[in-house]
Image (cartoon, rainbow, N blue to C red):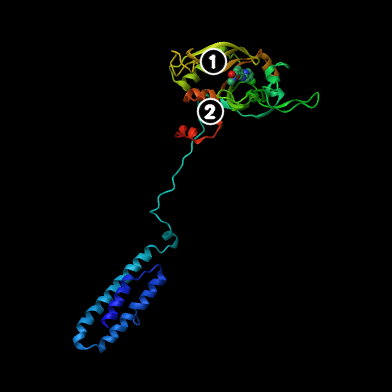
Amino acid sequence: MEERIKTLLNEVKEYLAKDKKDLEAFRMKYISKKGAIGELFDEMRQVSSEQKKNVGKVLNQLKQTAEAKLAELVERIDSTSDASVSEIDLTLPPIPNEIGNLHPLSQTRYRIIEIFERLGFSVADGPEVEDDWHNFSALNFPENHPAREMQDTFFVEKKSSEDGQDILLRTHTSNVQIRMMEKQKPPLRAIMPGRVYRNEAISARAHCFFHQVEGLYIDKNVGFADLKQTIYHFAKEMYGSDVKIRFRPSFFPFTEPSAEIDISCLICKGSGCNVCKHSGWVEIAGSGMVHPNVLKSCNIDPEEYTGFAFGMGIERITMLRYQINDLRLFSENDVRFLRQFQSII
Ligand code: 2NL
């Protein structure tokens, strides 16, 4: 009998219960009145008096062990009674959280927008597939201007009738300004960021598409000094307050007078390096006073209103900002390049 009790003791100690059903089975098998322990107590009556003391001792031990085991199993199963919880292994290492970041060109675009918004400029957008009028004619490009040639512009559809128009991929975002001037009366103050296309062979310095921000300010009495001060403010915000700017005479069909804008080289601070080709200056934008013919094309009276406009390449500004030397990096989607621009935004 002592042997049977010891076997039961081991069984009890090693009993595994995974749910309430197993728990009830344990209680029925060992602890209930008709269970194994109860039966052994009944049998105690037949045990000889000299053995009673020993057998009684181990039997009581079995009873206590079984009751303690039951209490332990009840507690464990109650605390994990929600089946779904027990399936989650909290000790597993977490899946790494890979945070992405804005493309460097987007970061620059947002910074440009932020600066001009605080000067009261709104942000406007327009179509990338455009007609000849909004991309060329309204901007005072003569009929035979070289920019209209196939080798410079991507044409989507050549005009099919005398009164039809060529359809093309816009070569600048000026089309958005034209559309705005056609629709709204001055004062107008807006910037137009967007993608533009040119039929160029792809290299470190040229691509068949790039990004531009153009700006337009039309009102009564807007002069060249307003253009200069606006650009100077922009340059200081973008590149730091000790930056210098300079205007060089230039030509665009849509502005008169026109000027190219340079900033003092950020890399060598004017002493000469590769970036500024040893001149101490780098070009950041083109600008000018809106040509009277452009205002007339949009039904704005050039005797009453004047305005300035400017255009800059977002790639160029980003390359200067981060010292990037190959334009192709922006469109190759190589995460080794893109991850270097991880920031809080
Ligand atoms: C450059 C030069 C420029 C403009 C863009 C403009 C637009 C209208 C009327 C007059 Cl609707 N001008 N835009 C003016 C001067 C320069 O861009 O080098 N861009 C990258």
Tell me residue 143's x, y (percent): 73, 17
Residue 81 screen position, x and y as percent: 41, 64
Q: Which residue matches tag 1?
A: 261
Give the class, few, some or many, for how many residues have Cα within 10 Å of label 1's Cα (few <14, many ≥20). many
| Camera-side residue of 341 and 116 | 341
Residue located 61% across and 29% down the image: 125
For residue 170, side relative to residue 163 (left or right): left
Residue 198, percent from left and from top: 64, 24
Work out whether mark 2 precedes mark 1 in sequence or the reverse, and give the earlier one. Answer: 2
Mark 1 lies on a secondary structure that is strand
Local SS, label 2: helix
- Amino acid carrying mark 1 in the image: Ile
Query: Of residues 88 and 173, which is closer to you in this image?
Result: 88
Is 95 placed left or right of 211 in the picture? left
Q: Nearer the viewer, residue 215 or 198?
A: 198
Seen at 67% across and 19% down, the residue is 147
- Disc 2 vs disc 1: Cβ atoms closer than 8 Å? no
Mark linked to residue 109: 2
Amino acid carrying label 2: it is Arg
On the image, which quarter does residue 261 sit in?
top right
Q: Quadrant of the N terminus?
A: bottom left
Residue furthest out toward the left:
50
Residue 210 in sight:
yes
Q: Is residue 96 above or below residue 35?
A: above
Judge the density around disc 2: few (<14), some (14-19), many (≥20) Cα neighbours within 10 Å. many
Distance in Å between CA atoms under marks 2 and 1 = 19 Å
* Residue 118 at least partly seen: no
Q: In which of the image's four quarters is ligand 1 placed?
A: top right
Residue 129: horizontal and vertical position, in percent? 68, 29
Q: Quadrant of residue 176?
A: top right
